[in-house]
Image (cartoon, grey):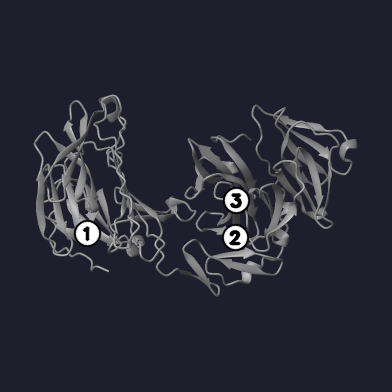
Amino acid sequence: MRLNTTKAHGVSYDGTYVYWVQTEQGHQAIMRAQLDDFAKTKQVLVSIGLEDPGDIAIDWLGGHLYFSDVERGAISVCRTDGSMCTNLHTNAKQPRFVTLDVKNGTMYWADWHHRPLIMMARMDGSQPEVLIDSLHTFATGLALDIPNGRLYYVDKTIKVFKLDSRQGYSLFEEPFHHPYAIAVFENTIFWSDWTSNSIQTIDKLHGPSSKRSMLITLDTPIYDMHIYHPVLYANIHNPCANATCSHLCLRVTNTTVTCACPTGMVLHGNNCELKEDYHPLYLVVGGGSFFSRLDYNSLGNPEVHTTHFDIGRVQAMAYDNTRDTLYIYDGQRKTINYINMSDFTLGITHLFLLKGLEDIVDMDYDYVTDSLYLVDAGRHFIEVVSLRTQQRALLFRFAEDETPVSICVMPDYGKMLVAIMVNEENKIFCIDSIGLDGQDREHLIRTDIRDNKKKQLLSVNSDDASSDNKEKQLLSVSSDFISLEEEEKENISNDNKKKQLLSVNSDDASSDNKEKQLLSVSSDFISLEEEEKENISNGGQIPEKT
């Protein structure tokens, strides 16, 4: 069976799901699907926090997925549904080809510590040690023959290592083409050969004296192989069955386990608790009334953290790092609501502003004056609202042929950058600098983007090192500010016309530097059909400042 995937490597199978690492357009993800219904059961397990994931190994007894990441220098473990992940402390530097001895609670991997090595540790990452340090090249294709206590790997040729006596030898006397991946089952060794793009086999008992066989030839190199047979998954006792770990239970030996916690949590006894003053770097993505919070400090799958908010349709967002609060403009009800990030998974927002809002396309927070800046494209002006007093003021009114579309507030400089569409027909935009009091407008950039439909407008304001300068770092990206061509509009549904809005916040690790980073992305600023305004009574209150 040939499965339809983009560039894939690292494969494993547990009898129900096939798991693999997929690479597409520079992005990596760990996937799984059922073999008998591949297209409909295909799902993403891990897509956040990956840089260069390698081979996959399945802990079929505990229900865990192990994988390495060379760029992060880490070996990680997740539940097989991707719902919970953690990094193991293994002293790994550039790990690849992680493989598991599930019955004995041991794992092996190839690594590079100024020289090529093969290392081993317990399956919780403890007791790491160098197993083989006499390699000629970076080892590939690690495979275990558990009943016979052998580790097979490629070091120019196929090598065999006896785990009990710590002695090794070559399966072939001569280097044999270009072997890469290895699998072992009963008396047969399987390997992929990159010279012939084939899978070949040999009897492991007779070695070089036996005849090598060509099993299959393909059009492309084979990166990994995995053999599944029920006999390899013997029904043995799982010590985690009687454990009381609150999150992850990792096998250490036949009888002992270790409890583990996801990033941002610490272990107290067998329970994981949130770290005090832990403020992760996370990205909030909103579309319609659904929001996802992506924690960039940990591995995971953003799809499992989607929350339905009690709003109509998000059109703009801003993050208040003082109160840890997200402000949301509801484009359907024409209101601004807020929600504290601690209540994010509840999805219950509170009304902040109701009256006088027409078409808010962007917002930004000024921590110095504790104010919220609003860009109203419908009324062609910028408004500011004090979060302490809820007093509002009109700062700047644009000409009728000028439509503001995005804002970046820079409190340290007393200015804001505003992206403005000055000619809708010819798709001409400019970026202006305006004082935070609405004075001293200055033209900075003017561009005609008729031939380039995706202009990115970036502004970064870095932090001062002193603790007295609590300026947040801000990156604002605006793309696709132009109306789509007529033929493109026909292929876009009303739901797709809703722009996607993203917001990121983080706390600096030092106690004196508690700034938040904010990433605001607005895309597809196309005209939405006028929606019926709802009559909502005013009664909004803002959260108390912490």
Residue hosting label 2: 89
Residue nearest the viewer, comparing 89 with 483: 89
Q: How far across and down, in percent of the image, does residue 344 sit?
A: 34, 60
In the picture shown, does residue 434 fall above or below 77?
above
- Specify which label sits upstream in the sequence, 2 or 1: 2
Q: Which residue is drawn at 60% across and 57% down?
A: 64
Q: How far apart are marks 3 and 2 (CA)?
A: 13 Å
Q: In this rendered view, identify the residue nearer to me: 189 or 178.
A: 178
Q: Is residue 424 left or right of residue 80?
A: left
Q: Residue 368 carries which label?
A: 1
Q: Which residue is drawn at 52% across and 69% down?
A: 246
Q: Badges 3 and 1: C-beta atoms under 8 Å apart? A: no
Above or below — where is 544 with respect to 2?
A: below
Q: Reading the chain from its start, which is encountered first: label 3 or label 1?
A: 3
| Left or right relative to 67: residue 166 | right
Q: Nearer the viewer, residue 304 or 370?
A: 370
Image point (65%, 56%), residue name: 60
| Within-10-Å neighbours for mark 1: few <14, some 14–19, many 20+ | some
Amino acid carrying label 2: it is: His
Q: Name the residue under label 3.
A: 67
Q: Is residue 248 left or right of residue 445?
A: right
| Residue type indicated by callout 1 | Val
Q: Find numbered disc 1 in the image and state the secondary structure of the residue it sits on.
A: loop
Which quadrant of the figure has residue 487?
A: top left
Frontmost of labels 2 and 1 is 1
Mark 2 packing: few (<14 Cα in 10 Å), some, or many (20+)? Answer: some
The answer to whether residue 120 is visible is yes
Tell me the kind of residue under disc 3: Phe
Give me the disc on residue 9. Answer: none
Q: Give the Cα distance between marks 3 and 1.
A: 45 Å
